[in-house]
């Protein structure tokens, strides 16, 4: 079937639309990336959050391509590595939750900086939800009959193009709340809820 994706336009687009639907749903639903993007949009505005948003898409694409090229087999032969990454990712989520909680209590915008492109890209490699998404993407949607470079290019284009509008939606929502964060009560409620969201996400991921 995979070899037919190139020769049959209808089959190709059916496959691609299924891929887009799956990844859009996974990207737009709550998770560590969207919590952090929302918080960044609220703290720094949409424009300054752009490198963060772009880093998420490209970092996840790199992560998925790495699995497609054989990293997933490493997890099958060394399951402890997957557990270690999940534990590390959960610990990092808790650290980020602490930082958000600290932001709720002490406002120091002049010394805080938004997450940069490279930092957002690297975060995907300790993001438990991103690993689940990448593994499922390769399992369900990698065209195994294609040349490896074409299959990797296909994954990258879809992942980057679909991810950006999904995370941008959360950044816009956060940016629209900027005015409410000038007041201490609004700041505490917003960043406190973001911190709790990360803690819940981390707890859920470690139990999977």
Image (spheres, helix red, strand yellow):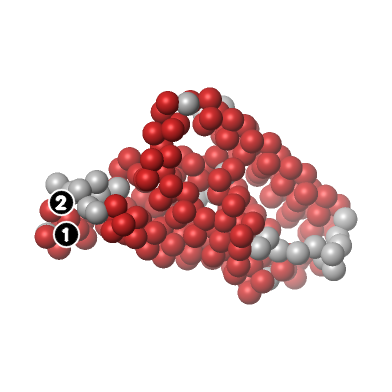
The residue where tag 2 is placed is: 3
Residue 87: image quadrant is top right
Q: Is residue 17 visible?
A: no
Is the C-beta separation of discs 1 and 2 under 8 Å?
yes
Residue shown at 52% from the left, 31% from the top:
82
Query: Relative to the observer, which residue lies in front, 50 or 189?
Result: 50
- Is 17 located above or below residue 31 in the figure? below
Position of 12 with respect to 121 (left or right) is left
Residue 13: image quadrant is bottom left
Q: Which mark is residue 6?
A: 1
Where in the figure is residue 166, as x and y percent of width and height?
A: 48, 61
Position of 21 with respect to 146 (left or right) is right
Q: Is residue 68 visible?
A: yes
Per the image, label 2 sits on a secondary structure element best described as: loop
Tell me the crowding category of disc 2: few under 14, some 14 to 19, or many 20 or more residues within 10 angstroms, Cα based: few
Position of 34 with respect to 94 (left or right) is left
Tell me the crowding category of disc 1: few under 14, some 14 to 19, or many 20 or more residues within 10 angstroms, Cα based: some
Query: Relative to the observer, which residue lies in front, 184 or 32?
Result: 32
Outermost residue toward the bottom in this view = 47
Residue shown at 79% from the left, 58% from the top:
187
Where in the figure is residue 66, as x and y percent of width and height?
A: 43, 47
State the separation of the CA atoms marked 1 and 2: 6 Å
Residue shown at 68% from the left, 60% from the top:
115
Q: Which mark is residue 135?
A: none
- Is 136 located above or below residue 61 in the figure? above
Where in the figure is residue 171, as x and y percent of width and height?
A: 60, 64
Residue shown at 64% from the left, 57% from the top:
119
Numbered label tally:
2
Position of 37 with respect to 19 (left or right) is right
Per the image, label 1 sits on a secondary structure element best described as: helix
């Amino acid at each position: 079937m995979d070899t037919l994706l190139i020769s049959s336009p209808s089959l190709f687009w059916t496959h691609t639309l299924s891929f887009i639907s799956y990844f859009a749903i996974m990207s737009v639903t709550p998770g560590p990336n969207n919590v952090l993007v929302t918080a960044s949009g609220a703290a720094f505005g949409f424009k300054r959050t752009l490198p963060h948003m772009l880093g998420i898409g490209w970092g996840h694409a790199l992560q998925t391509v790495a699995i497609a090229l054989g990293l997933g087999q490493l997890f099958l032969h060394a399951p402890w590595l997957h557990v270690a990454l999940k534990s590390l990712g959960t610990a990092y989520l808790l650290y980020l939750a602490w930082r958000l909680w600290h932001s709720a209590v002490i406002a120091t915008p002049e010394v805080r900086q938004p997450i940069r492109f490279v930092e957002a890209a690297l975060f995907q490699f300790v993001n438990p939800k991103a690993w689940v998404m990448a593994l499922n993407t390769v399992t369900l949607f990698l065209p195994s009959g294609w040349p490896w470079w074409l299959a990797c290019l296909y994954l990258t284009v879809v992942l980057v193009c679909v991810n950006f509008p999904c995370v941008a939606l959360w950044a816009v929502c956060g940016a629209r709340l900027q005015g409410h964060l000038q007041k201490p009560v609004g700041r505490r409620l917003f960043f406190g809820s973001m911190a709790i969201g990360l803690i819940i996400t981390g707890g859920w991921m470690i139990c999977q």
